[in-house]
């Protein structure tokens, strides 16, 4: 059995930088920033997260800490999702990483190993060293150039400040190479009845997805409602998948993530007042369109190692876009309708030719665009603009 956990952005969180994490219990779910590596001696290499279309280095979009104490090899478990910031590429890459309870890196209340050198700019494997000072590591020549230009290493190399980057320079670097860092907190999705009864955590449905909005004039509101109902400039009308998507997120309009978590057999069924059809499908993907859904054989496939068919694990919701500090007006802005992650259902742990467990296993990230079913920008803006407040 499954339960759906929803992810929300937590604005006032403590430091999420990997260096601030002192034990496994503190590993955060988060958007952006640097990855927290489970395999501290084996950070991911840049070659695995280079965009196949524009060849740029893809920053981490989301990390989700997903331990499973019922699978010995996955007592500690992470899923990392990387995305190209160039919105025209639509490139995503996903990796699973895990450790058994007894390991040399982490335990519940301590970090057991020293981290291998990482890139000063992004936190990927620091396989290159500055030839001048030999004190700073980089993942690539591209990020060495970023450090030289934006990080002012050209002026500090060989000095007492050669490993230091000023606050203003860091802000410029992060804007260039990262998605802004935000913590994700999770809660079990409320039932329809619970959501309707709650006044504290649910914004009014009409003001979110088609009703009165205090930030709109009456005329703008009428136009927005007409967009949702009729979609006159699109190739097709709003389809059943979008209507289902819209109806389900009414329960919690600010959700940025939906996670299909396995429920223990002896746990109480939190969906006991849901109807049977919903109970059977509530852990499946909420698509924004009936078109361009993935095919199991060609798009999702089987685990590369154990050959079990991959299963849906979690999806990133379009509401996340409103929290990202990107130029939403640009025709090259990072954009998606939803991104669904499919992974090995058994959390299998393959080994290399010498018997050493592999630190990273590629999984599938399938993205679907709003435009796939003819939804125009006005509909997308209505949906996204009411789900979250764009951060300052």
Image (spheres, rainbow, N blue to C red):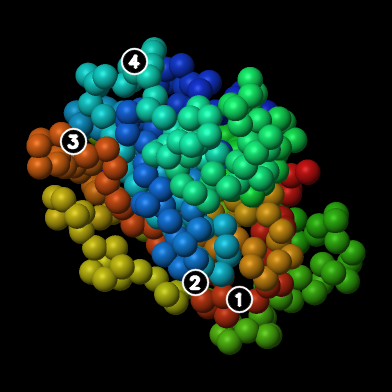
From the image, tell me which residue sits under label 4.
Answer: 112
Q: Residue 347: where, in percent of width, then height?
A: 23, 41
**Sequence-first tag of 1 and 3:** 3
Mark 4 or mark 1, whichever is nearer to me? 4
On residue 242, the disc is none
Viewer-proximal residue among 314 and 193: 314
Q: Residues within 10 Å of mark 2 (few under 14, many from 20)?
A: many
Q: Residue furthest top?
A: 109
Rendered residue at 37%/19% (across/down): 114
From the image, tell me which residue sits under label 1.
Answer: 375
**Sequence-first tag of 4 and 3:** 4
Real-space Cα separation, disc 1 to disc 3, in angstroms: 45 Å
Q: Secondary structure at mark 3?
A: loop
Residue 79, by quadrant, is top left
Residue 195, by quadrant, is top right
Q: Residue 290: where, in percent of width, then height?
A: 45, 74
The C terminus appears in which quarter of the rendering? top right
Real-space Cα separation, disc 3 to disc 2, in angstroms: 39 Å
From the image, tell me which residue sits under label 3.
Answer: 357
From the image, tell me which residue sits under label 2.
Answer: 289
**Sequence-first tag of 4 and 2:** 4
């Amino acid at each position: 059995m499954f339960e759906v956990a929803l992810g929300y952005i937590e604005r006032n969180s403590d430091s999420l930088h990997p260096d601030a994490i002192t034990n496994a219990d503190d590993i955060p779910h988060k958007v952006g920033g640097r990855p927290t590596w489970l395999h501290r001696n084996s950070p991911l290499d840049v070659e695995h997260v280079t965009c196949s279309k524009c060849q740029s280095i893809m920053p981490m979009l989301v990390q989700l800490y997903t331990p499973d104490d019922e699978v010995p090899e996955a007592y500690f478990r992470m899923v990392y999702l990387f995305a190209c910031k160039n919105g025209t590429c639509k490139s995503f890459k996903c990796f699973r990483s895990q450790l058994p309870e007894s390991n040399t890196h982490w335990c519940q209340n301590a970090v057991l190993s020293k981290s291998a050198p990482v890139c000063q700019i992004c936190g990927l494997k620091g396989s290159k060293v500055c030839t001048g000072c030999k004190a700073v590591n980089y993942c690539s020549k591209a990020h060495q150039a970023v450090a030289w230009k934006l990080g002012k290493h050209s002026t500090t190399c060989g000095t007492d400040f050669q490993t230091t980057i000023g606050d203003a320079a860091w802000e410029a670097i992060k804007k260039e190479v990262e998605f802004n860092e935000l913590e994700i907190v999770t809660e079990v999705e409320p039932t329809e009845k619970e959501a309707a009864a709650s006044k504290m955590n649910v914004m009014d449905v009409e003001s979110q997805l088609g009703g009165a909005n205090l930030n709109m004039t009456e005329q703008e509101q009428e136009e927005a409602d007409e967009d949702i109902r009729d979609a006159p400039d699109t190739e097709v009308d709003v389809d059943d998948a979008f209507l289902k998507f819209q109806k389900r997120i009414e329960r919690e309009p600010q959700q940025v993530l939906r996670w299909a978590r396995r429920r223990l057999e002896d746990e109480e069924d939190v969906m006991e007042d849901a109807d049977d059809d919903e109970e059977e499908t509530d852990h499946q993907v909420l698509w924004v369109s009936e078109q361009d859904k993935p095919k199991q054989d060609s798009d999702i496939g089987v685990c590369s190692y154990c050959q079990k068919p991959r299963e849906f694990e979690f999806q990133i919701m379009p509401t996340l876009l409103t929290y990202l500090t990107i130029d939403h007006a640009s025709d090259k802005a990072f954009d998606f309708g939803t991104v669904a992650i499919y992974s090995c259902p058994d959390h299998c742990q393959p080994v290399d030719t010498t018997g050493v467990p592999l630190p990273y296993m590629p999984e599938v990230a399938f993205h679907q665009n709003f435009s796939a079913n003819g939804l125009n920008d006005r509909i997308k803006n209505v949906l996204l603009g009411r789900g979250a407040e764009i951060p300052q």
